Image (spheres, rainbow, N blue to C red):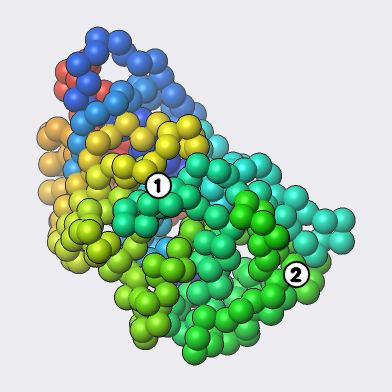
Amino acid sequence: MTRTPKRVAMLAALMALALFVAACGSSSSDSGGTVKSSAGQKIPQGKQGGEVTVLSAGDVDYMDPGQMYYTFGYMIGYSVNRPLYSFKPDNAEKAVPDVADGEPQISSDQKSITVKIKKGVKFSPPVNREVECKDIKYAMSRVFSANVPNPYATGYFGTIIGAPKTPTKDIPKISGIQCPDANTLVLKLNQPKAATVAAALVMPLTMPVPEEYAKKFDAKNPSTYNQNVVFTGPYMVKNNAQGQLTGWKQGKSIEMVRNPNWDKSTDYRPAYLDQVHVDEGNSDATVASRRILNGSALVQGDGAPPAPVLKQAATRFKNQLVLVPAGACNVAICLPTGEKTHNPPGPAV
């Protein structure tokens, strides 16, 4: 299964759409206006507060951004961590700066990319510090290690000078990944492919990883950072004081709560919800879909509604159906309207 920047755009837009409009629990009588999905549909805009439960059949493949590869992992990953660039819910084609501060600057010979790093983006507990260039450098280097196997690092970033052709025993020192200062990342290439590499800066492996915290986990084969991830997004998976992910019961559930170090002034995501619960093991798509249509504050996770349920949604629950350009899965059932002042409809995660 190949990941392309365009496919990442679709997945990221789907997740961003959910974060952008899904909300419940507000006591305001203001309808909050509307926003548009990337398919052009008008959706009532969400309001601050509330919780939602995501019904999924399976689990994410990885929580570690350096290893995640499949759709559901991306959908969760883009809500708890921030890459250099990502996609707003109304545009799945044009990436916008996320951890980056501005567009990538490409040299005239197409062999150099300069990216400014946004100030004010912070890691969740227990790291609690501002993201710097060194964290992107470490994140992009660790995926060339055999301890952090990544299926696309060489394909998209193999033209960076010093990037190994095969996985190394230890995390390599890649000379083409440079940090001239704390807020500037420079990528030097051995081929004139800067435009291609710049387009791939939406990939999860550009999500910051703090070396001083993660290196002890990355020293193991395989890396155990997957169970100890720190986050930069509006949400984080529940953890303990040491950073262990207590809110991820693999194959059963994921509990996402607010990241206390997230600064909304640095992010385009309103991130209305207070908590997101992922309930796994919903392998019967018909049962799960009907439960969503008839329930409250429930959304679709990694599946799609069967044709009969989709027909039911299109005819009887039109306000719960949102078309999202997300590759093979382009339909999402949304939570029901309920009381308009308390539970505005929002799209599935």
Question: Which residue is found at the position 52% from the left and 81% from the top?
Answer: 171
- Look at label 2 and name its amino acid: Leu
Residue 193 appears left or right of 272: right
Residue 292 appears left or right of 183: left
* Between 295 and 67, the one nearer to me in the picture: 67
* Between 48 and 314, the one nearer to me in the picture: 48
Query: Residue 37: image x %, image y %?
Result: 45, 32
Residue 306 seen from this side: no
Mark 2 residue crowding within 10 angstroms, few (<14) / some (14–19) / many (20+): many
Query: Residue 213: image x %, image y %?
Result: 39, 67
Query: Residue 307: image x %, image y %?
Result: 27, 46
Question: Which residue is found at the position 59% from the left and 58% from the top?
Answer: 133
Q: Residue furthest top?
A: 29
Say which quadrant the C terminus sits in. Answer: top left
Query: Residue 90: image x %, image y %?
Result: 51, 33
Q: Residue furthest bottom?
A: 169
Circle 1 is placed at which residue position?
233
Q: Secondary structure at mark 2?
A: loop
Residue 261 seen from this side: yes
Q: Secondary structure at mark 1?
A: loop
Point out which mark residue 213 bears.
Answer: none
Circle 2 is placed at which residue position?
189
